Image (cartoon, grey):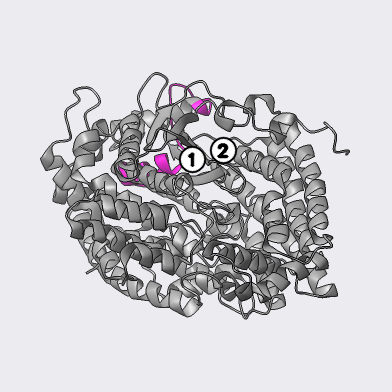
Amino acid sequence: MSDNGTINPAIETWDGPMGLPRREAIADTDYAPAIRQGFVRDLAESAAIADNPEPPTFANTIEALERSGDLLSNAATLFFSKAGNDTNETIQAAERELSPQFARHAGEIAKNRKLFARIDTLWQQRDALGLNGEQVQVLKKYHRNFVRQGAALEGDAQARLIAINERLAELGTAFAQNVLKDEADWIMVLDDEADLAGLPSSTIAAMASAAVERGHEGRHAVTLARSIVVPFLTFSDRRDLRERAFRAWTGRGDGDGATDNRPIIAETLKLRAEKAGLLGHDSFAELKLEGTMARTPEAVNTLLETVWDKARARAGTEAEDITALMRAEGANHDLQAWDWRYYAEKIRAARHDYADDEVRPFMPLERIIEAAFHVAGRLFGLTFTERPGTATHHPDARVWEVTDANGDHKAVFIGDYFARASKRSGAWMSAMQLQSRLLGRTPIVTNTMNFAKPPAGQAAFLSFDDARTLFHEFGHALHGIMSDVTYPSVSGTNVPRDFVELPSQLFEHWLTVPEVLNGFARHHETGEPMPAALVDKVLAAQTFNAGFDTIEYTACALVDMALHARGEAPADPAVFEAEKLAELAMPKAIAMRHRPPHFQHIFSGDYYAAGYYSYMWSEVLDADAFAAFEEKGDVFDPGLADALGRHVYGSGGAMEPEDAYTAFRGRLPTPDAMLEKRGLV
């Protein structure tokens, strides 16, 4: 393809309102040609940098690389946004074709010996170049990334690494598409009123809406969307239906059919171990932990095992309480995983004396969005103004312009809140455009959720956990919005993996601040604030079932690390998983939050591979960081908020994470505040 107008200009040039792409002008078939041509241009641009006859400088090499690749970046951003948020067969076919090509392209760039020689020369001379702190971090990132792509390898070893990366990209795409297909295909349609026994009205309404979406109008449907299946497991009186839903939910990617992810896991682990060896590391975990705060698998396991022991003890007490209730109600079966949420909810309701549906009327989605904006305004002086009618990736998505304390344009924020069959599960933040003073760009940031969509014309209401999820992802969004750096490669969330969850988890704390709850948790009809007694009950219940919650998460992190901390892949990952859980004495009535066959964090790509621990590592930071505000006696203390904005939300990867945190807090944290927050002390 020639480089002369054969690409849809709406992909290459974003000239919509506020610098957004004109998504309405892009067809599904436009992405692949633009990406292919992006590969061609990016190779030519990197070759021109490599062939520069002038000696390498930071400006003519690193800054030149920072300025290159615009077409590929724009096309890839739009394509993967579409793939994650509103996919279809055309997009999925293109994803299968293009994913290995992205890996191959990265390998081709790294193979340019002259380009790497320039980067390596600068790295070796870094102390004599007069670079500022951010430039050192950018140079370090380029050097490390090129080495990880095999730039320092020779001949067959380099070719093998490129082949491994291509195959890993194929496997990650197949893994994600298999999980999505299992989620989209499974449905449990309920016809009998008795099938709804125990379910709150909010869950019944969500199931009715899901039934309409799946073509079963007038009935009720349980789907594998977390916003439906978790409430169903929590409230349904029908033990047989709970078991059926639970087995489907935990069995995603774990069957003998076309969507079986177990062979993909085995091959992925084998290739990752080989990749680590080629790059001179003893394990894939060692490779991935290079450059993180944790540094080593041993440091990760020390934290996880400390928490695991405390969580197991707490979960044992919780199991005893549940078993006692089961016996009191006349149940003679053993406690199983599809029973835990159901009976734990009965204990919670009795102990804390409120029902989930008492909370929801006070937490309409619109008010919780406003609450998140309010906190961002109080802390950082930001204002969010909705711009209705602005085209995005889906009609459900909404657009806000973000302005700073001076009223100047700061960013664009896009919120996409409702579940649909074409969207992958979970909740996440993505940056469509990174902030960069070098490139003169402001951020475009998206939050994606999977809340149950209400029937047409009705308002959406959130559980307290849903509201916390919204605050969490908005914390990630603020990390992108608040970015104030020169170079895009260290902008926003481009930070070490075990630091990236700090801004999101920290922001969750403000949901429970009295000013926020009293101001925004108001009844959707009367406008009255949530009664103080109900607020007290909700907050008191935040550490209820702490053993279960911590086991669910920590088991995933421990298994992830165990799978990747070996010099060679386990012969049978499923057997290894079972053996590891047995070694940990995993409670039989608690399942991993993400079993390997649907553990997208670590197998739909490798960003969180050997890195799922990072949520807890960051939790140590966030608990200590919020304690700083509490110590001040003002959770909106202007001085602390300014330091937080500059050193945590604004600095991106321009500083080492330890330095960024210390600049804000004055010291590094201990796990004490985190353990107290989780109710494990």
Q: Position of residue 628 (x, y in %)?
A: 25, 60
116 with respect to 156 (left or right): left
Q: Residue at 48% across / 64% down in the picture?
A: 655
Residue linked to disc 2: 85
Element at badge 2? helix
Residue 440 position by quadrant: top right
Q: Kindly identify the amino acid type of the residue bearing the numbered disc 2.
A: Asn
Image quadrant holding the C terminus, namely bottom left
Spatial distance from mark 1 to mark 2, Cα to Cα? 8 Å
Residue 448 marker: 1
User: In the image shown, does 9 or 285 lie closer to the viewer?
Assistant: 9
> Which residues fall within the magenta stretch?
213-241
Quadrant containing the N terminus in the rendered view: top right
Q: Name the N-terminal-most of marks 1 and 2.
A: 2
Residue 386, horizontal then vertical, whole percent: 43, 27
Q: Amino acid at mark 1?
A: Thr
Contact, mark 1 vs mark 2 (Cβ under 8 Å): yes
Between 612 and 366, the one lying in front of the other is 366
Above or below, 280 against 14 in this view is below
- Is residue 239 something that shows in the picture? yes
